Image: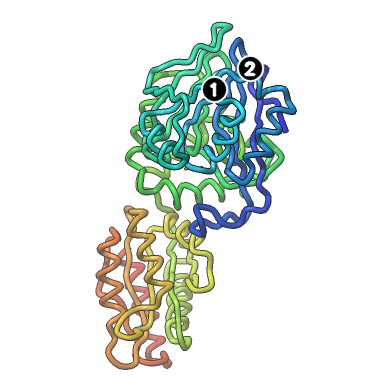
Amino acid sequence: MKKTISATVSWVGKVDWELERFHGDEYSTHKGSTYNSYVVEEGKTVLIDTVWKPFAKEFVDNLEAEGLLSKLDAVIAQHGEIDHSGALPELLRRRPDLPVYCTANGVKSLKGQYHADWNFQVVKTGDEYDLGNSKKLVFVEAPMLHWPDSMFSYLTGDAILFSNDAFGQHLATEKLFNDLVDQNELFHECIKYYANILTPFSPLVIKKIEEVLSFNLPLSMIATSHGVIWRDNPAQIVHKYLEWAKDYQEDRITILYDTMWEGTRIMAETLARSINEASPETTVVAHCLSKFDKNDALTDVFRSKAVLLGSPTVNKGILTAVAAILEEAKGLKFRNKKAAAFGTYGWSGESVPLLTKALGEAGFTVVDDGLKALWSPDSSSIEAISAYARGFVEKI
Ligand code: FEO
């Protein structure tokens, strides 16, 4: 249902409390999400983005019930991904005359997904949509935030930046604004979202933010496409993004591992205990990858200055949960992270050299050849693991 944001802007999106997985099964959404859609009612009435496909009919029915469907003069499709464009087919079935403003890449992605030849109006950075009443929407292309087709829209007068995926978070809430929700929960979801979605595009994040800041535009709100609208000090999330985009790290070490018969688990626990003894001010976390949420593990990697990755040797290789996290890490292109490998073995012992090589290929700075333990660690192995942990702390 319609909720007021400013004198002429309303939220008309969908709160998805049930959502547990996003991007297929790739991203865990423990707190649900929202698909934010906005309507600007000036001389012209314009819809900015829609909602995910399962909610298309409900969304367009709501627009009709609010008397908005027949009033619309245009729809702005800031990003073609289906969580924002999913209601366009239903909307345009009922309003086929409606122009669709999007980037040139937006046309490609919308045509590619919906196979429809809508009334596309291609825009680029600096183009404007005249809303009447001396107000306009100014478009800013934002490629890779999140897809090559993404763009922002800036509403003059109200000074609202509609940022689509950028500055969002997967957080279902009926509270529209950032100052009305639990701050720890909010920033946890923000950093998880950045770590798992935007990390590979950090250089573009910096460039785009610097470009937008150079316009010296007043900013009263950042209206994202997921989660809350930033109205209380909206610049705070911009500064967080700049911090996260610039080789971010905390005084934190993350230990990720999987285990078959507990030997590698004992190594992980010994490493955690010994790192804590050697460097009490450092936060240490250890996660068993076959049990722990993958996206939460990757968030910890993003926050860390160093990572220890462990697997026993299995069939001259590594366990699949560990292989999966390496594949994710390779794509996310973490920077400014040191790393090393560890693992138990009974016969051939390939896991540690394989992990060491893979960590380097994924962009980590590998500090040594890693740590092997034969069979299940005994007391002398435990002492060797502790000594290794002390040395690891020295190296980072
Ligand atoms: Fe929220 Fe890239 O879609």
Residue sitting at 39 percent across and 28 percent down? Answer: 103
Q: CA distance from mark 1 to mark 2?
A: 16 Å
Instruction: Classify mark 1 as within 8 Å of ligand 1 or not, answering yes or no.
Output: no
Task: From the viewer's perspective, tell me whether residue 283 is left or right of residue 335.
Answer: right
Residue sitting at 45 percent across and 42 percent down? Answer: 113
Front-lying residue, 171 or 309: 171
Binning the other alpha carbons within 10 Å of mark 1 as few (below 14), some (14 to 19) or many (20 upward) gives some
- Asked which secondary structure carries label 2, the reply is strand
- Sooner in the amino-acid sequence: mark 1 or mark 2: 2
Whether 21 is drawn above or below 254: the answer is above
Q: Position of residue 35 (x, y in %)?
A: 60, 40
Label 2, on which residue? 41
Residue 243: mark in rendering: none
Residue sitting at 68 percent across and 23 percent down? Answer: 68
The residue at the far right in this view is 65
Image quadrant holding the C terminus, namely bottom left
Q: Position of residue 290 (x, y in %)?
A: 49, 74
Whether 145 is drawn above or below 264: the answer is above
Task: From the viewer's perspective, tell me whether residue 75 is left or right of residue 318.
Answer: right
Tell me where residue 64 sits by quadrant: top right
Mark 2: which amino acid?
Glu
- Asked which secondary structure carries label 1, the reply is loop
Task: From the viewer's perspective, tell me whether residue 239 is left or right of residue 353.
Answer: right
Front-lying residue, 97 or 130: 97
Q: Position of residue 186 (x, y in %)?
A: 60, 45
Image quadrant holding the N terminus, namely top right
Residue 98: mark in rendering: 1
Q: Position of residue 308 (x, y in %)?
A: 38, 69
Mark 1: which amino acid?
Leu
